[in-house]
Amino acid sequence: MQVGCETDDEGEPVTRVFGTDGVRGAVGKYPMTPEFVLKLGWAAGRVLGDHGRRRVLIGKDTRLSGYMFESALESGFAAAGVDVRLLGPMPTPAIAYLTRTLRASAGVVISASHNPFHDNGVKFFSSRGEKLPDAIEDEIQALLDHELEVIDNRRLGKADRISDAPGRYIEFCKSTVPNGMSLAGLRVVVDCAHGATYQVAPRVFAELGAEVEVIGASPDGFNINEGVGSTHPQALQSAVLASQADLGVAFDGDGDRVIMVDADGEIRDGDALLYVIAAGRIEQGYAGGVVGTLMSNLGLEEAIQALDRPFRRVKVGDRYVHEALKHEQWLLGGESSGHILCLDRHTTGDGIVAALQVLAEMARRESSLAELLAPMVILPQVLVNVRIDRPVSLQDAVIVEAVAEAERELAGRGRVLLRPSGTEPLIRVMVEGQSAPQVQAVAEALADTVRGHAAR
């Protein structure tokens, strides 16, 4: 994921720094070095300054390296003559919202989302609170090959901090549910993953009337996503059962993903939550379809179709879900990982907003989460992450034959999907079918084949 004449750790030239979700990598290794991030800020400032106001917002999650990259970006933007407004630790979707409402030319997020603390990244939102168009990314990319030139001293950018950002975002989140909706009498466990939601998520639910128990809200710069949050829901399960809560809500490190745990301790992933939201909207007159991904459970597709609405699959990544929604002029989509887009409420995936839509539906129907999910039959699905130390071609004959054998074993009653992660050195092996033991065995066999091939 690098640029121009830069090289990767093996000395090989690479050409592009932007992935599907901005720039991301290990802290201290290209591209996530202070030198590169400074230049990225300068290049982005040059481009974005030509496309609107010369002002950007910068927010971050709770990683220790966020201080370093915040300073680097601030310097780069200032050198390009762009003013910076610093938000501090705030969820990614909050930065999208504030970029739009504060009329900035762009919003910048310093985060590696669900990754551990030793990774970090930079991603951008347009003035409309949406991810940057490819054409703008390409302009930034092209400037990265040029020498950094500081603008005339009289036109250097300035920086200040926005002190009321959390309050603004909390009020926005509350505005996405019906006026007068109360969570009084509901006991909710909120898991903030020691990440960017730790200041705002508990307040949102408490101000709507819920009795809130909070876990994963003591960030120290290193513990983001560590044993808590949407990628480690076992902590939330235990807390919900121990406190006899009605519901548990877990976010990832930057707050754009959400999963839930019901009163019985059952994990309800993004597919389940998307179904609840879509079913409620459809009952109230929503005429559009729903977008999922290649990883979405077949049960979600069948449940949406049973509601007489189309379901479309796209590549994994909320960028692709968003593109499909815009193309189809639909409003609802998401991923099983918990990225859920409600474009009638926000311009981007938002964990808190999505959770509130589920709670609003529970209140409207006077039903538990489990009751709302009764019509949806989830097929057994197993996902195995195979860590790799070198690139692996999924078109290799050994892997192609292993996939074909897995599909023969499922006998047309399931799905097999292998894909490289866009953010980590992993091959994700997904198997779905009618029988949980069979699905587990097929997934493990496939993972062993990939692991063995990668070790050669």
Image: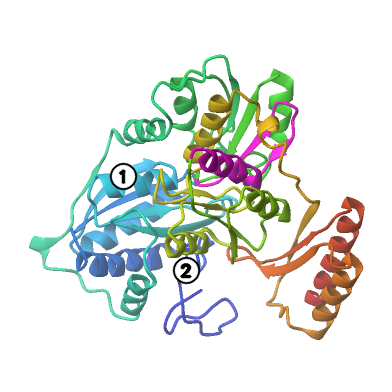
Position of 96 with respect to 320 (left or right) is: left
Mark 2 highlights which residue?
31
| Residue 51 place in picture, x, y as percent | 22, 66
Which secondary structure lies at badge 1?
helix
Which secondary structure lies at badge 2?
loop
Give the magenta range. Answer: 256-284
In the displayed structure, 352 sits above or below 49; it is above
Position of 450 with respect to 87 (left or right) is: right
Question: The disc labelled 2 sits on which kind of residue?
Answer: Pro
**Residue at image coords 54%, 25%:** 363
Q: What is the quadrant of residue 391 in the picture?
A: bottom right
| Residue 238 place in picture, x, y as percent | 73, 28
Q: Any magenta on residue 262?
A: yes
Question: Gap between marks 1 and 2, in whole Å?
Answer: 27 Å
In the displayed structure, 286 sits above or below 404; it is above
Question: The disc labelled 1 sits on which kind of residue?
Answer: Leu
Quarter in which the C terminus is drawn: bottom right
Q: Is residue 22 visible?
A: no
Position of 32 with respect to 260 (left or right) is: left
**Residue at image coords 52%, 60%:** 321
Dot 2 surroundings within 10 Å: few (below 14), some, or many (20 or more)? many
In the displayed structure, 411 sits above or below 68; it is below
Q: Any magenta on residue 282?
A: yes
Q: Are marks 1 and 2 in contact (CB under 8 Å)?
A: no
Mark 1 highlights which residue?
98
Most foreground residue, 411 or 48? 411
**Residue at image coords 47%, 45%:** 350
Most foreground residue, 20 or 296? 296
Q: Is residue 271 visible?
A: yes
